Image (cartoon, rainbow, N blue to C red):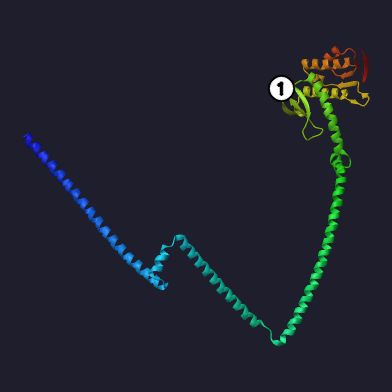
Amino acid sequence: PDLVAQAEAQAAAALAALDAESRTAETAAAEREARRADAVLRRDEAQRAAVAAAEALETARGGACLDAAEVHRLLAEPASRIDALVAAIAEHERRLALAHALVAERSRLVEDHAAARPAPGEEAESVEHLARIEAEAEAHAARAAAVIAADDTARERRAAALAELALAESGAEVDRVLGEVIGSHDGKKFRAFAQSLTLDGLLAVANAHLEDLAPRYQLERVPNHDLELQVIDRDLGEEVRSVQSLSGGESFLVSLALALGLSSMSAHDVRVRTLLIDEGFGTLDPATLDSALCVLDALQSQGRQVGVISHVPQLAERVGAHVRVVQRGGGRSEVIVA
């Protein structure tokens, strides 16, 4: 039984393979038949096209009065030669069209001239009219020449005036610079400029004293403002502060540095050797007060006379010579020099 089943299976497989090969052969035969029919169709179309081309060639040859040998010779010419002939023909046609247009334009002008030609009696009047027009044109040309001559003269005068103006402006340059520096007639701008130079010197000396009194601060001028001051706070990373932001004690130290700087400045042969300080010490803490008094002691050792008006007891202890005002009642006071 197994052998029979195997034989039947093999027979079925062989039949299936045979059937597949048969279908493949039929498909290939159908494709070949289709290709053959397409080739026959293309061949017929090519034959018809060849016949039509031959007929067209014969018609063109007959119209151009060319024999077959001439046609074969022309067809043997290279493509560049044919292109050149075509271009030459196009150029001849363009020139021919231009000639026709020119002839038509000349014909129109001749006709217009014939239509506008005056009658024999009108020729004299036309000549007189043209003579008047010519005389008017000459008069207008003479007037225009006079205007041009006057304009040339005016231009020369203007050039001379501009040269004089440039020379005058060059000579006035010094006055212009002085005017910008001095400013108004009252000299306020120049005065502020001169005072700003003096203030620069004062700030240099005052900052030297401020190094001893309050090293944290440094004074400088406000940019673009000649006589205004601002403070650089070194403890806050060189922050720029307004002088109004200082506390009472800080303002006193800055003012004291400015006063010391002013007393240190010289005006020719005159030196300020006396310095009076009124109050302000009460706003200082003990350490700052001691630093300020040390600076004043150093000034006194340099020959300066320093007078302090204050109610701070520590000052009375540090100052050797002092003047006390004692109230006696009844609106009376007594001055005691110690």
**Vertical order, 284 against 126 (above or below):** above
Image position of 125 (left or right of 272) = left
| Residue at image coords 74%, 84% | 125
Q: Mark 1 = which residue?
A: 235
Residue sitting nearer the eye, 183 or 44: 44
| Residue at image coords 87%, 36% | 191
Image position of 310 (left or right of 9) = right
| Residue at image coords 39%, 68% | 69
Spot occupied by residue 312 in the image (x, y as percentages of width and height)? 83, 16
Image position of 74 (left or right of 214) = left
The image quadrant of residue 212 is top right
Q: Can residue 50 be seen in this view?
A: yes
Quarter the N terminus occupies? top left
Spot occupied by residue 44 in the image (x, y as percentages of width and height)? 28, 63
Q: How many marks?
A: 1
The image quadrant of residue 240 is top right
Mark 1 residue crowding within 10 angstroms, few (<14) / some (14–19) / many (20+): few
Spot occupied by residue 324 in the image (x, y as percentages of width and height)? 90, 16
| Residue at image coords 26%, 55% | 35
Spot occupied by residue 20 in the image (x, y as percentages of width and height)? 17, 46
Could you tell me the amino acid type at mark 1? Asp
The image quadrant of residue 18 is top left
Residue sitting nearer the eye, 202 or 157: 157
- Secondary element at tag 1: helix
Quarter the C terminus occupies? top right
**Vertical order, 51 against 238 (above or below):** below
Q: Is residue 312 visible?
A: no
Return the residue found at the far bottom. 121
